Amino acid sequence: MNFKKCVYCGQDKPLADFSDEHIWPDALGGDSLDRFWRTEDVCERCNNLSGLFVDGAFIRSMFGQSERAIGAWEYIDVTKPGSTILPLYYCGQLKSPALGSDETAEYWAGPCGANILHVRPADIEDQWASYAGGDPRAKKIAAGRAYMALTSGRLFWVHVSLNSFKAHFKRAQRFVTNLQLDPPAAEYFKTNMVDPNDPLRARDMEVMEQVISAAKEKRFLKLSLVIKLDTGTRMLAKLGLAVGYKLFGIEFLDSEYAATLRLGLWERDPNKRKNYPVYGTGYLGQQPFPDLKGILNWLGGWLLLLKVSAGKLMLFVVTPTGRTMSVMITDSAVFLERLDESFTEGKVWLTIPGLSRGEGPLGLPDYLAHRADVREVSVLKAIEAMRVDRSSLPPCI
């Protein structure tokens, strides 16, 4: 039987145990990037675990969810409201005396500020506290009930809101509180009006009324959020390990720093994890490029930058809003001398989830010249041409 080493766990496993892994998460546009950001050298177990506990911890955090929602608005197709889906904004958990101690109510904001309440079983394990929506493994029976109050009666936004509501709460029972759907539409969206004679739905609507009344009176709801200060750091360790392998091969996986990255990837305890010398910074860390604020990021896109600087090969991840995360791939002279000059200048990949499109690698000087309107890059110009003019969108009211 043939074996090979798994990039993430470092164990030798049978070839049948391996699967296709998106190094950069598919939920953030990984499927549109070139093969550099994919590998078949990760075992299926690590693939599943990293998707749930590592990538998922960032993607489903309040920050990851907000970045995705903000970015999606840049490339709405106004000609296709029936197929447009926008990520929702996670706002936090809502406390209410109407709820039992075994349930949680989450407040989400949809297109045009649509008010959404998700009532679901409370999480048993603390590790899901920072996940928007809780444990993603929850089965349909535990997916709860989702209620949406539309804030726009315009047909475009009604379609987009219903599409987004359906896509996000796939497993939950869904109810629209202020729109009467005809039978075909109700069947398509699997969404119904609330039966006032159902005691459970009536109780849920007591909580929903807190949301609706706060919106009408333009006052803030009292919400609770669990925020992890090290958001994104495990995902960065995973990226560092995989990128190092793609560039330097199996020799990198046997290096001392790769072992450190592996510890940073799999250690769940943040207090222990911060003691591992993984060089870089998470989502809430110090920003490395203050002079490039507003130039380095791409509205609606995620930028991945590989650059050698001060004797280190670094990976920088720039979010749609301009937050920058980073991780060192290596500072070994043995590995660095294998890289060509393009890594000193900087190599850029750009992925636009809203367009299912990725570009790169591009030279960092070319990218910055384009963003500063010094020199045009044709592929970037083409993406800019697809960005929606906000004034062309139907008004919400």
Image: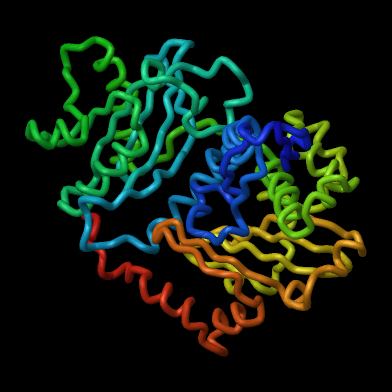
| Vertical order, 255 against 373 (above or below) | above
Q: Colour scheme used in the picture?
A: rainbow
Whole-percent x, y for residue 73 in the image: 38, 58
Percent of width and height locating residue 147: 29, 29
Front residue of this view, candidates 36 and 311:
36
Q: Position of residue 5 (x, y in %)?
A: 75, 39
Snapshot quadrant of residue 330: bottom right
Q: Which residue, as the protein is rendered here, is positioned at the far front? A: 1
Q: Quadrant of residue 40?
A: top right
112 or 146, which lies in front? 146
Q: Is residue 53 visible?
A: no
Question: Looking at the image, is 363 positioned above or below residue 203?
Answer: below
Residue placed at 7% from the left, 34% from the top? 182
Q: Does residue 225 appear in the picture of this structure?
A: yes
Q: Quadrant of residue 80?
A: bottom left
For residue 343, side relative to residue 147 (left or right): right
Q: Residue at x 58, y 26 (%)?
A: 128
Looking at the figure, which quarter contains the C terminus? bottom left
Residue 201 locus on image (x, y percent): 25, 17
Q: Is residue 390 above or below residue 255?
A: below
In the visual, does 118 lie left or right of 292? Answer: left
Residue at image coords 21%, 35%:
189
Q: Name which residue lies at 31% across and 19% down.
A: 204
Q: Quadrant of the N terminus?
A: top right
Foreground of the two, 91 or 250: 250
On screen, residue 38 above or below 43: below
Q: Say whether residue 173 is left or right of residue 307.
A: left
Most extreme residue toward the bottom, as rendered? 374
